[in-house]
Each structure stands twice: as structure tokens, then as C-alpha cells.
Amino acid sequence: MAASKTNDRVGAIETRGIEPVPDNERHGQAGQMFWTWFAANISILGLPLGATLVAFRGLNIWQAMLVAVVGAFGSFALVGALSLAGKKGGAPALTLSRAVFGQRGNAGPTLITWLSRVGWETITTTTAAYALLALLGISFGVDQNTVLTLVCLLVFIICTLLISGLGHATIMWINKWATVVFGVLNLIVMGFLVATVDWTKVLDAPTGPTSGVIAGIGFIAAGTGIGWANAGADYARYLPREIPGRRLIVASAFGAGIPLVLLISLGSLLAAGDPTLATSSDPVAAINAMLPSWMAIPYLIAAFGGLLMSNHLSTYSAGLTMITLGLRVPRPMAVALDVVLMFAGGIYFMLIADDFYGPFSTFLTLLAVPISAWIGVIAVDSLRGRTYDSEALMDTTRTSRYWYAGGFHLPAVLGWAAAIVAGLLFTKASTSETDVWFAGPLSDTWFGVNGLGWAISMAVGAAVYALFGRRTGAATGTGNEPVSPALQEAGR
């Protein structure tokens, strides 16, 4: 479908789907990535993440802050680095992934990515509905019931649909201004939360084990940047090629790192005095109970808005991913279908499931493994100077340059599969000591106990593809051929 840059303007419905953006329609600055990732990470979900560092990992506040800095800044620097492919190829991340895995081989990573997006959306939608229910209860004295729960879910979903449905330009504009508004509100709320901290317990807390620090970095990275690594190119694809890549990396790392470090550190402080935040089935209510009653309304507004900023980004990417999977509908329709699933997930969490945080933690643990495997393969491919053929990306037939062997680029597909198996060997996903969803045979080793299955998956994926991908790529002409100096300069 032909599309013009006039469709990528604030308030207009973006008509472009996954087809690459031509150079004459590129626009924007690297700073957009700062606002994009700041907006995605100002939600209160950072607080329970920080709480687990103290409650479950046994870290003190200084260790927790170190973990937050390394895990958040480091993982989003990786997001920025992977988003360079979007600037170079002009297409969403999983569409560009066709060049690496093959037109059929790309289906696996794309499906996992879509499941990840839907899972995050469900978590965010559930938390936002809790915030809206609490706001209605305080403002109008309305008690929570099934009908009201469904209404609150629908209100948040409709808000998400309005923003995500309009598309890229509207999202970029809202990210910037909403970040300022909700960022200020969150700072005010955080100031009052700090006043509730039991500083005696915080300062007297013993130093946790080094293994807890390592595990904490892995947990924070998996719960923040790793979950967004397969979406960075979606928002960088409209940027001009000549923007230096290092600016995108720095903007991404600081855009996400600043709010995450503040929120995770605060969550750690709060848990040092009251560890119940880490296990609360309703984190919104748990945090609200720590505030003065008159602060409840601004807090809940900030919570709702921050979660909306994260959710519309995830929903936008999910729509693009569904189209990449083969759904033949316009992008806004793909977004609409995605929110239906989001609504169903919200109903499960709020009206059926007994525990909020348990499934959340387990979800992060399991999906981090295949996503990390994809990252390992893609990172190696990008380092080799991958160029993208726009026509071949959109050609899903046997005539495509990216058809390879039966639609599969075997070095990438096998590397991804081997990495998943390796990662799961060291992975344990559970909601409690007695409720174990999955436990790999090596999950009780040092790597497994410290939650590094995802890191092993990334390393194995990179190693296998580095070992076997170059020879095949050189023989078949995959786009890994030497790049001219002009193209190298444009891709920096």
C-alpha cells in the first residue's frame, strides 16, 4: 500500500503498515527516542520491580541502586543499538528480521514477540484498571464490582486504541508532552513516598550476596530493556539515515534509565520497610496505602497516565508484529484486534487469577529466553553490516531474496532454537516455592539460581550464528556482503 509522509502527522491516521519508509519521507531527531523510552518507563510497575530486589534478592539499598543503574541503562543501551536497524532499513524490527531468519523462519521469533507484547499489555491494562477503580472509589465512594471492573478495563483500552490507532506521529507528540506532565506528577508522588520510608531499617539492612546483585541485574534487564529490544526499530524507522547511531543509543539509555533508576530505587526503599509491596496482588492499592489520603487522587492519575504511555507503545508494536505474521488488514485494524486480546487478558488477571505479581514475574522469566536468543542472532547480524532490500522484505514468495532454503535461513533459525534450549536448561519460572511453572534440569546451578538463563540464551544465539552464519551468508548473498564506505557512514 502506498503511503505518504503526510500520513505521519499528528492527529492523522498513519496509513503505512510494515513497508519500509523511503528516504524522502524520513524525518525527526534522535531526541525522539529519549521521549519514547522515558514515556514507556514512567509507570509504577518499576516500584514492585525494585521491591523484589530487597524482598527476594536480599539486597540493601546501595546494591539495589547499583543494580538499577546497570540493568536499566545497560539494557536500554542495547535497545538503542538494535533500533539502528530501523534507521537503516526503515521497517519495523520483526519485518527486518525476515532478512536474517528467512520469510518462513521469521515466524517463530515474530510469534514470540507478539506474545510478549500482548503479555505486557495485559499486565499494564490490569494495573491501570486497578488505578481507575481506586480513583472512582475515592472520588465517588463506589465499591469495586464485576461490572465496574469491566468498565475500567474498557476505558483504558479505548484510550490506548485512540493513541495507537492514530499511529507514529501522534505517539511521538504525546510521548514528549505527556512525559513532562506525568513525570512531574510522579516526582511529586515519589517525594511523599520517600517520606514514608523507614530509614532505620533501610540503613541497618545488611549487605546482600554478590550472587543477588548479579541475579538482580539480570532480573531488571529482563523486566525492562530486554522486553523492549524487539521494538526499538519500530520507532526509529522514520528517522533519517544520517543521524549518528551513537545519539540513538545514548538517547534510548538515558530516556529509559532516568525514570527506571528513580522508580526501582524507590521501590527498594519502600520494601526495606514493608516487603509486602513485592507480593501484593494489587500494587496500586499497596502504594496508595502508603500515601496521605489527600495525595491519592494525583497519585492515581499519575499511575493511570504513566501506564497509558507504556501501553500505547506496546500496542502499536503489537499491531505491526501481527501484520508481519501475515495478518492482511490495515494497521489500525491490527491494533483493534490486539486490544480485544488485551481486554480478555485483563479480565483473567482481575476477575479470575488470585495473584498479580506471581504470573508477572513468571511471564518475564520465560519470555526473556526466546527474546534474548533473537537478540543474540540479530546483534551479530547487525555487526556484520547488514543491508536491507526493501522489495525482498515485502516479498514473502519463493522469488524473495530472503527466501533462502524453503523460506528458512538455517544458521539463524537453528542458532535461535539452540539458544532457547540452552537458556531454558538454566531457567526456573515459579510464582512461589511450591508453585513451579517450569524448571530446567540445570536451574539449580549457579547460572540458574542467579537467573541468568536469558543471558546464556543470548550468548549461545550469538555464538552459533557467528560460527555458521558467515559462511552461508557469503555463499548465498544474504546482505552480509561488504558495505560501501558511503553506506557505512549513513548507518552510523
Image: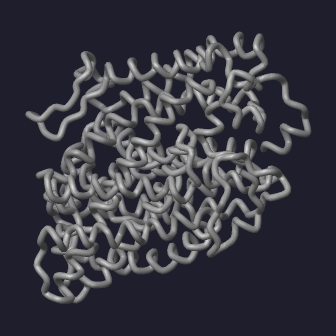
For the point 46% across and 35% down, the residue is 111
Taking 156 as reference, is 93 above or below it? above
Q: Residue 434 falls in which quadrant of the image? A: top left
Residue lying at the far left of the rendered structure = 434
Residue 461 screen position, x and y as percent = 52, 22
Which quadrant of the structure image shows residue 30? bottom right
How many labels were placed on the picture? Answer: 0
75 to the left or right of 149: right
- According to the image, what is the colour scheme of the structure? one colour
Is 223 positioned to the left or the right of 442 in the image? right
Q: Along the line of sight, which residue is nearer the eye, 73 or 342?
A: 342
The relative height of residue 4 versus residue 185 in the rendered view (above or below) is above
Residue 42 relative to residue 10: left or right: left
Would you place residue 8 above or below residue 90 in this image?
Answer: below
Q: Position of residue 236 (x, y in %)?
A: 66, 53
Whether residue 112 sits left or right of residue 60 in the image: it is right
Across and down, in percent, residue 49 comes to 30, 53
Of residues 255 and 23, which is closer to you in this image? Answer: 23
Q: Residue at x 43, y 24 (%)?
A: 456
* One can see residue 82 in this view: yes
Would residue 198 be visible to someone looking at this image?
no
Above or below — where is 276 with respect to 370?
below
Residue 193 in picture, x, y percent from top left: 26, 74
Q: Residue at x 34, y 23 (%)?
A: 424
Task: Give the residue drawn at x 40%, y 52%.
Answer: 68
For the C terminus, give its image quadrant.
top right
